[in-house]
Image (cartoon, rainbow, N blue to C red):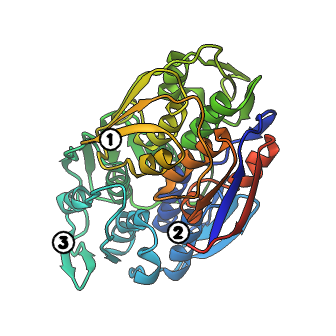
Amino acid sequence: MDKLIVHGGSTLAGSINISGSKNASLPILAAALLTDQQVIIERVPDVSDTNYMLQILSALGCEVERYSGTVKITAAKIIPDAPYELVRKMRASICVMGPLVARLGRATVSIPGGCVIGDRPIDLHLKGLSAIGAEIDNQSGNMNIEAPKGLTGCEVDLRGKHGPTVLGTDNLMMAAVLAEGTTIIESAACEPEVVDLADFLNSMGAKIEGAGTRRITIEGVRSLGGTRHTVIPDRIEAGTFMVAGAMASHDGITIHRVRKDHLSPAIEKLEEGGHLVEFFNDGKSVRVTPGEAPQGCNITTTPHPGFPTDMQAQFTAMFATTPGISVVEDTIFPHRFMHCAELVRMGANIKTDHGTAIISGVEQLSAAPVMASDLRASAALVLAALKAKGTTEINRLYHIDRGYEHIDEKLLLLGAKVERAQGSI
């Protein structure tokens, strides 16, 4: 099991390219199941989550070819049963439900297990599919989904307890593109990744309007065809490296292949914290320079276009050495603060209570052996380690490999002193 060894105190400089979005790639890859023609998807990041999805597609009968960030998929002859041994490794594998039911009229997918960052129910996924005609039977840990009379469009409200569901919106949208009639999704997720999926489906011949708003309209079509699509840049990876530039550089770092319009919450909080954020190249590149007088600020996570829950851990790491008091509240996943205990091991002054972290900035963090608990928590520990005095060992690196493509290589390009090693935890 790999661990990352980070020698703190290096000053970051130079530039890197951001990879394609992991969260956009997964449903787009699943959507290849909707056609028997070849689809070509570019800038698919080489991370473990996309690797698992490609394994699932292969197990379902797809012909898959991958090279240099490009994936070619032909789903000419597929089966409806997603194997448990692969599905259990990644919650996002449930997004094969919608395409399989739409294409084959039935699907069998294992029920996802628990998640360390908190409760992530799939009831809204099932509500959406049921509304357009799917019949669902949970048996022996599997969801057996059938549409014996086909799928028929209707109006569905996907409002959930903690806001819209991204994968639930994706699943229903993918199922509805081949349904009879028109489906309207109210309270839809409007994240950029949902828009990217809609753009992919439309390029295949789907008729989707309103993606990026709370109301999406899908007019069903009889079939979809092949296409070529480039995945959007990963806004969470971009935000993570923007925080790295503010925390651990002197004259700033430059980050290429970004979308300015996807990064507004991170931009706002970095600038509020006193750091300099400069975009160029039509908003496709950004330079982040540490402020001379950084200050703490408050963050509350909310559904897009609010501050993303996937960025709160990284900002918490930055606030750990930012003068003053910062408050981070996560309304999406109130239990998503396991990184805070590890940051405290490194000398941070953080108090957590009922979905809120209060961070009193300290002058210096010190290296310590720490353990990653989830994808974004591991990124926060890497950021803290860059700033800490001494050498930090971050165990369970497989968490970060789920969503950050070759993060150690990108850090090395920026001048960080990092190395992979075999861990024992």
Return the mark for residue 53.
2
Q: Amino acid at mark 3?
A: Glu
Q: Secondary structure at mark 3?
A: strand
Q: Quadrant of residue 92?
A: bottom left
Residue 276 in picture, x, y percent from top left: 64, 17
Could you tell whether 398 is left or right of 306 in the image? right
Residue contact at pointers 3 and 1, CB within 8 angstroms: no
Q: Any mark on residue 352, and which?
A: 1
Q: CA distance from mark 2 to mark 3?
A: 25 Å
Kindly identify the residue that appears in the image at 59 percent across and 42 percent down.
384
For discs 2 and 3, the disc positioned in front in the rendered view:
2
Task: Please tell me the numbered disc located at residue 135.
Answer: 3
Q: How many marks?
A: 3
Residue at 73% over, 30% down? 249
Query: Where residue 315 sits: x, y (%)?
Result: 50, 34
Mark 1: give few (<14), some (14-19) or many (20+) Cα within 10 Å: some
Q: Badge 3: few (under 14), some or many (20 or more) residues near its Cα, within 10 Å?
A: some
Q: Secondary structure at mark 1?
A: strand
Q: Amino acid at mark 1?
A: Thr
The reply to whether the C-beta atoms of the residues labelled 2 and 1 are less than 8 Å apart is no
Residue furthest bottom as drawn: 140
Q: Earlier in the sequence, mark 3 or mark 1?
A: 3
Amino acid at pointer 2: Met
**Label 2: which secondary element:** helix
Cα–Cα span, label 3 and label 1: 42 Å
State the separation of the CA atoms marked 2 and 1. Answer: 35 Å
Q: Which of the image's four quarters has the C terminus?
A: bottom right
Residue 290 vs residue 34: left or right? right
Circle nearer the N terminus (2, 1): 2
Reply above or below: 277 against 348: above
